[in-house]
Image: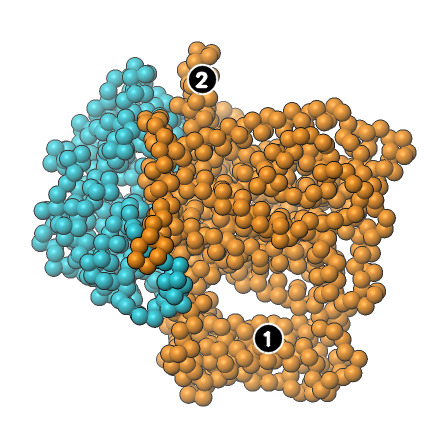
Chain colours: A orange, B cyan
Amino acid sequence: MRRLASTPSLHPAIVLWMMVGLAGFCLLPWYGIEDGFFNFEWLFDGYPFDEDYAPALFLLLQGKKPWLAPMGLALLLPLFLWKRRKNDPLFGTLLIWVGAAGLLWFFLQGFGISIRGWNFSFLNGLFGELGDRQFGMGYGAVLTGIAFLFLLTLGIAARGAVGGDVFVVSSVGLIIGLVGLFIFMPILKMLFTALITEEGGLSIVSFVGKFFSGRIWSLDCLVGGSRCGVAWNSLLLAAVVGVITTILGLVFALIATRTGMRFQRILRALTVLPVITPPFVIGLAIILLFGLSGAFTQAWAWVFDVQPTRWVYGLPGLLIAQTLAFTPIAFLVLIGVVEGVSPSMEEAAQTLRANRWQTFWTVSLPLMRPGLANAFLLGFIESMADFGNPLILGGNFDVLSTEIFFAIVGAQYDQAQAAVLAIALLIFTLSAFYAQRFWLGKKSYTTVAGKGDAGVHPPLPRALSIVIGSVAVFWIAVTVIVYVTIFYASFVKLWGVDDSLTLDHYVQAFAVGWNEFGLHWKGSAWDSFWTTLWIALVSAIPTALFGLLTAYLLVRQRFAGKNAFEFGTMLSFAIPGTVIGVSYVLAFNVPPIEITGTAIILILSFIFRNMPVGVRAGVASMSQLDSSLDESSLTLGANSFQTFVRVILPLLRPAILAALVYSFVRAMTAISAVIFLVSARYDLSTSYIVGRVENNEYGVAIAYATALIGVMLAVIGVMQLIVGRRDIGRRGHAGVQQVQVAGGG
Amino acid sequence: MKTKSISISTAFAALLMAGAANAASVTLYCSADEAWCQLMARGFEEETGIKVDMTRKSSGETFAQVKAEASNPKGDIWWGGTGDPHLQAAEEGLTEEYVSPMRDQLNDWAIRQAESAANRTIGIYSGALGFGYNKDLLEKNNLPVPACWKDLTKPEYKGHVQMANPNSSGTAYTTLATMVQLFGEEGGFQYMKDLHKNINQYTKSGSAPIKAAGLGENTIGIVFMHDAVAQAASGFPIVTVAPCEGTGYEIGSMSIIKGARHLDEAKKFYDWALTAEVQSRAKDVKSFQVPSNKSATQSPLAPDLSQIKLIDYDFKKYGASDERKRLLKKWDDEVSTLPQ
């Protein structure tokens, strides 16, 4: 994308996107191949004339699907820009028109004409019966759509937006397009479905009535009633979990970067364990330990001679489980931030005679604010959206996420109610999001500048060291007990009934043998295991890439509508997986995007659900990188693309690693969205484990989960080796600079 | 247990060639438990050579999916799960009419199920409602052995009884509808209110109360009796009780999805699933429901329907979505809000 000094006959970017678009229009099958996106059998089966496999051009030549023609013509229009310069007014205007009109027509025909002809009945009245139909879009359509999008952004850049920076405008366009298509479209479709009343009409009144019902907002419990509304339950739980996880995450980040404590490595390894644990397993372990018949409860009852109770079901159990599960996320966010605080500021404070406590309290901690706010936000939203733990530990403490799930799959089957609850959930998460931005304000938290930045972090105040040390020891003890329980339970024949040890559960899940075809994957878990592994790996890379690209745009670029842009990219995180799952089924079951039952829908749901974490990690780290770094890169002649790739990305290695690891792990352990999206051919580990739990085969479920934990540790270790670590070039301080996530892995 | 043999190379080839053979296939939505679903899918594949793509989801989830996919159905046949969502799907026209030649071999209740839905569904198994208790915990707490529905409302069981929330679970809705039919609407709701005082938790899923009892986390669970039997068969100290007043039941059903892409294969599966031989296999995977084919054999552990006092459960009335919504709302307003 270098700007060439001489004017070529046609701008190279135009040539590129025209070629892409024409390739999509003339060479590749326009419609989706029913046998799967990655199946290339069509090449030998009637291509390019067979109607199922024909490119748009061949369809038109055969006189079919005439509504595709305008797009082919639009793709040729940029030829009018032959020998015109970029600053020619026609250049930008024409490209904008071609791109915008092309995209508009692209979606109009896609949504307008469906599997049964016209998609909307008023079109029947307008144009009469169509007598033709079309299926979901395939490779050809995808390329053509992309070409129109980038021709449009090229035009906008040529008109001078964002300083005429093609890379930035194109990136913004790409992210908006993706987020619009894969987050807004499905959600809008579902909310629209939700406004539909039982009689089939649209009604705001019934919506309002449902929204303000006592089941959601009642405050009875404060005045002696039986229970409060689910919304308040969710809010209380999420706020407490957010605060606890942020504090613990900070404690561990401080230990990992600022102390010489010997158990650092153990701590790093242990804080990662819960996040790579499949759903339900921590909950099961907590029941085995703290439930009515749990070891801990029974021992307590015996020692103090009291009746054992079901104390763990409800708020206490949820707090334990969610704190265990989400602290590592706070840790992952905070470790980069704590490490990135410039020692020179702290040294300056010390030079000015601040003692260790003053330095920590007035310099180090305020500089960590972006990290703290992000960690709280993530903990809050994770807790709000958590589904597995409330399901088995919630007792009578109902929360929004499970209510939504059961509104949809329950005996009532009430999508409208689910949407109403989802809106309450959105209000909370979005308010937290805005509160966070308000708190951070417009202050600068830059500490990694291009200037001399050599120094050593000062040690922590002694009293603080002792406190955080003991918190960490307690944490380590709890985590070790929980995981020893899980590990042990995977070998126990039948917990509580037959305590003999056995390998049966592993054999049943993971047996391998030989037969006449070679290696024979005999165990019942292999199918879902391989599917999960490759889908998780495939989705991790785009998740990290889109996340960091978005973070770069948010932190470093100014453009119109940036707030809306940020809101849009964060929105999917505030939507519970259950809602994403159902809305994906509703939106992507029908043309133009027909991908239910494929691996693609799973990959897409992972990318767009996990992208916000990449964004947050990137934003937190990037606000610490001084923009003078980019400026010097730009001054030295690099364009914004080169700056992003060569300067920003290498400095963001901890954030990249965090995003990769997180999205991989989430894909391996996600349940709430995928339970709607899995199919026979693409079953995932988590839904398989849920099936085992439902079927009383706790042993197999826990054994499978234990094996998954091992696999995830190995993959995370490999990712760490590949990504490497950020070398900020400070004076040596053994063990301090390692930006590791799972040191013990 | 499936034992599929795929070497790495054939797996790779299969990935590239998938669909190349274009062999006959059928997409099965299965709402029974995993092992039973696998047994059905693999059994049909082996005996007919028709490939089965199977997805297992609860009946509520499957209903949601079939409804969502109505304009472009992906599934062909929906096998298993409690009858109400099948009836609801029939009512909404999401499923296809079919009269199987196997019909004369079936029990009356299975045929009645089909007739009440204009032949859009059929009964494949049935299970009676009841409860189970953990005998170790009962002894430990010096509680008497419960035998009737009314026993469960006695004050000594306070905090020892679990049932599912009727809003989220078909099992619990069946319980509610059973009480209304057993004691009349007034008496039924009075019973639910009395029971409410003893309930320690309304679980989300229908079989969760007896699973909690198996793990020693709860004493008495109101569930389908075959679920309690399955716990006992897994080795947990669970005793199953058929309540003395009589009880309601569910009919596990099967429907062909409207607009199925593989209609012929779906019908083939339908007939096959109704044979005595196939239905007799359920007990091998710890499913203890009563089969709908009269000559299918049953496990000795299974509850004997003829020994249980069954009420004349009105599936048409209590399966209809209006009546369901009314009862659930009444339960929500009058029972769930009471202090415990």
Residue A94, compared with residue B34, is above or below; it is below
Mark number, residue A697:
none
**What residue do we see at 63% from left, 29% from top?**
A472
Where is residue A350 shown, x and y percent of the image? 87, 33
Give the distance between the C-alpha atoms of the residues marked 1 and 2, in whole angstroms.
Answer: 68 Å
> Residue A333, located in which quarter of the rendered image?
top right
* Amino acid type of the residue tagged 1 in the rendering: Phe
What's the chain of the residue with tag 1?
A
> Viewed as shown, does residue A158 lie left or right of B27?
right
> For the N terminus of chain A, which image quadrant?
bottom right
- Mark identifier at residue A148: 1
Chain to which mark 2 belongs:
A
Q: Earlier in the sequence, mark 1 or mark 2?
A: 1
Tell me the residue at 29%/39% (across/down). B171
Question: Secondary structure under badge 1?
Answer: helix
Which of these two is toward me, B203 or B301? B301
Q: In the displayed structure, does residue B126 sit left or right of residue B140?
A: left
- What amino acid does circle 2 point to? Ala
Rendering coords of residue B326 (x, y %): 32, 42
Q: Nearer the viewer, residue A266 or A365?
A: A266
Q: For residue A299, which numbered disc appears in the image?
A: 2
